[in-house]
Image (cartoon, rainbow, N blue to C red):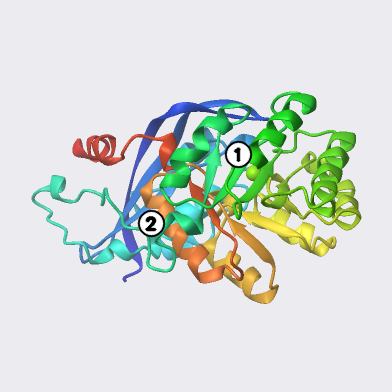
Amino acid sequence: MTNDYRFEFRPYQRRFLRSLTTNHGNWNIREGIILRLTDESGKLGWGEIAPISWFGSETLEQALDFCRQLPDKITDEIIFSIPDKLPACQFGFESAWESEFFSMPYDASSLKSAKPPTRLAPPCPMPHAQFYSGLLPAGEAALNQWETLWQQGYRTFKWKIGVYTIADELKIFESLIHTLPAFTKLRLDANGGLSYEEANLWLWTCDNLKANGELPLEIEFIEQPLPVEQFQQMLELSTSYKTAIALDESVATLGQLAACHQQGWRGIFVIKPGIVGSPSRLRKFCHQHKIDTVFSSVFETAIARQAALKLAAELYQNNRAIGFGIDHFFEQEETWFQSLWNDL
Ligand code: MG
């Protein structure tokens, strides 16, 4: 590749088929930016900026402002000096820079032929649902929806907690563990929505069921039980119970991830490549510290997913399922994606 790229970008919106409910509230529309780099020989690189500001990344508006102030031609220097306060932009630009689509033919006389790939096959290392964690809806709806995912091959599920009262959720949990087939793995994701007492109760419940031989499946971990500010309490909980804890919101960006590691976190780290920041620096960190990771989606399109899965395949150290089992939250990508770039 040469050192100079033509830069273009398109904002996009995708509506969730069903509203995504977490402790942070309801999420109905995924908004992001698709970007395209063209080198001097006409080869293309695709990237995607998919921020989640309530999770710790920049806002969509900040990402758009950054794209708008860039010149039409950009260089390696620009791509590799995006500030840390724009982690989703760092990911989008760097992954476009290293994307594998540069070999696509480019016909300058017909820009319509230069469409992004709409059906990207998952990369070879993890092609099947059994390697993915399927996302269940919060509350009782999980009891009806696991089966479809099971039939698609999912064997690890994530269920959102901290959405309804703990009394209700513990009741549903009791049904869920007896409804899901044996040998399933279940992750409980609180999105920072529990109180200290509630987190203790969840961890105690899981430990206790296991100790009494009453757990027909494996509780793989409880994810982000407490808010980001309560790191010390989560550190303490992680040594007080056998049930594992994973940090997610606490380690949204590379800076936060390094800080938690430096402060002694040796539990699980959920990495969302789409918002964590620079892929090259993430690689460096993971190679240096052999951390226990779960790679996870930010409800991105196929463009960012391809780059994120590539990173996951490269960096994961264990047999944990990756959190990309979210296709059932969107319609097929083909139609909207082509319309996005047709007007170019
Ligand atoms: Mg989470």
- Label 1 Cα neighbours within 10 Å, binned few <14 / some 14-19 / many ≥20: some
Q: Give how far across and how far down residue 6 sits, in percent.
A: 30, 54
Mark 2 / mark 1, whichever is N-terminal: 2
**Residue 314 drawn at (x, y percent):** 50, 70
Q: Is mark 2 within 8 Å of ligand 1?
A: no
Instruction: Please state the quadrant of the image where ligand 1 appears.
Output: top right
- Callout 1: SS: helix
Which quadrant is home to the C terminus? top left
Q: Residues within 10 Å of mark 2 (few under 14, many from 20)?
A: some
Which residue is more in the foreground, 150 or 198?
150
Q: Which residue is mark 2?
A: 74
Query: Looking at the figure, which quarter contains the N terminus?
Result: bottom left
Amino acid type, callout 2: Ile
Instruction: Give residue 55's quadrant in the image.
Output: top right
Foreground: 14 or 182? Answer: 182
> Between 192 and 176, which is closer to the camera in this rendering?
176
Q: Position of residue 279 (x, y in %)?
A: 53, 62
Alpha carbon of mark 2 to alpha carbon of mark 1: how far?
54 Å
Q: Secondary structure at mark 2?
A: strand
Residue for badge 1: 179
Residue at 62% in and 47% down: 85
- Residue 184 drawn above or below residue 200: below
